[in-house]
Image (cartoon, rainbow, N blue to C red):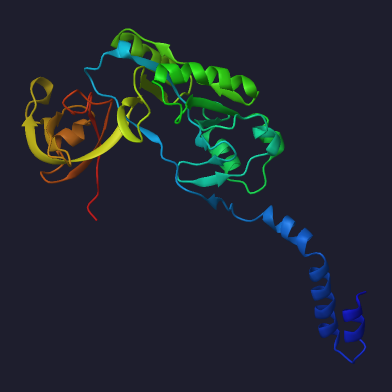
Amino acid sequence: MSIFLSKTIATPVSALSLIVIILADFIRRNISIIMTVLSLFAPPILFAADKPAIQLATKITEGIDINQYYVSEKLDGVRGYWTGDKMLSRSGREFILPQWFVADFPKQVLEGELWLGRASFEAMSGLARKNIPDSEMWRQVKFMLFDLPEHGGIFRDRYIALQQLAKQSKYLQVIPQETITSDTMLYKKLHLVVSAQGEGLMLHRKQAFYKVGRSQDIMKLKPKYDAEAIVIKHIEGKGKYTGMLGAIVVSMPDGLEFKIGSGFSDEQRRKPPQIGATITYQYLGLTKNGVPRFAHFLKERPKM
């Protein structure tokens, strides 16, 4: 027992007071152990840093020369920005990683995805947000590299450089890039990736320099996108839909108008969304004029 505690209990005290004194003395002497145990159950605390200046992808548009792009799988992981000594999220928060995991990483800026495998985003996200790294789980993670922001060369050269850098650590791996020569091959690859529980595809223009912000030098192709638009017109159907809705004309937030004729049930064709209603639709990429491709109706947004 400490001198402080011995002197304190030398005076008459109640049983409850004595318990409080003993508990306070125990906490004072074991505070570091207590804080460590509590941290295991506390909500994740990530440390803020400067938000990294990164390149962001746009949605794919029609009319591009597919031969000018490398195509790779879009990994469903957690984006990471390795500064040379720490790993940041795209918002600038520092991930707490095991020291052995990054011990052999190059002392230069790398971009990639912290990845556990397909259909494992929730597990990877939870792991990346822990205060105390789960060493055993991190042994299953790869930092999948896709760019070198400070390299200075075109993407083709950056891709070659990444392959050399990845050899420095068994936890580094470069996302494979390939050349595809037609839209038919592109969508066939998309189908294969999505069928295997992949998220979609990324297209990097081979001759592009790294540009901070959104750029069509890097585009994403997913099987489906969601968006909203306002109904401005009804078009009557033909054939089996005579006397019913054939399609609706909608207006996008930027004022662009287009038709949606699929996705409606027979009941919805008999009682279509009213003019002025906001609807949600799905589509697959954009045409070169910015019109959603293969758009189909999903639902009408309830009035609030």
Q: Nearer the viewer, residue 36 or 51?
A: 51
Image vertical order of residue 273 relative to residue 208, above or below: below
Residue 65, x across and y down, in percent: 26, 13
Q: Nearer the viewer, residue 4 or 168?
A: 168
Judge left or right: residue 206 versus residue 114. left
Judge left or right: residue 50 versus residue 10. left
Q: Quadrant of the C terminus?
A: bottom left
Residue 73, x across and y down, in percent: 44, 21
Displayed quadrant of residue 53: top left
Displayed quadrant of residue 193: top left
Q: Quadrant of the N terminus?
A: bottom right
Q: Nearer the viewer, residue 291 or 69?
A: 69
Total marks shown come to 0
Image vertical order of residue 6 relative to residue 133, above or below: below
Q: Residue furthest front?
A: 152
Q: Residue at x 34, y 9 (%)?
A: 185
Judge left or right: residue 32 versus residue 295. right
Q: Residue at x 7, y 22 (%)?
A: 238
Q: Residue at x 60, y 40 (%)?
A: 127
Q: Residue furthest bottom?
A: 12
Q: Residue furthest top?
A: 181
Residue 287, x across and y down, in percent: 20, 23
Residue 213, x across and y down, in percent: 34, 37
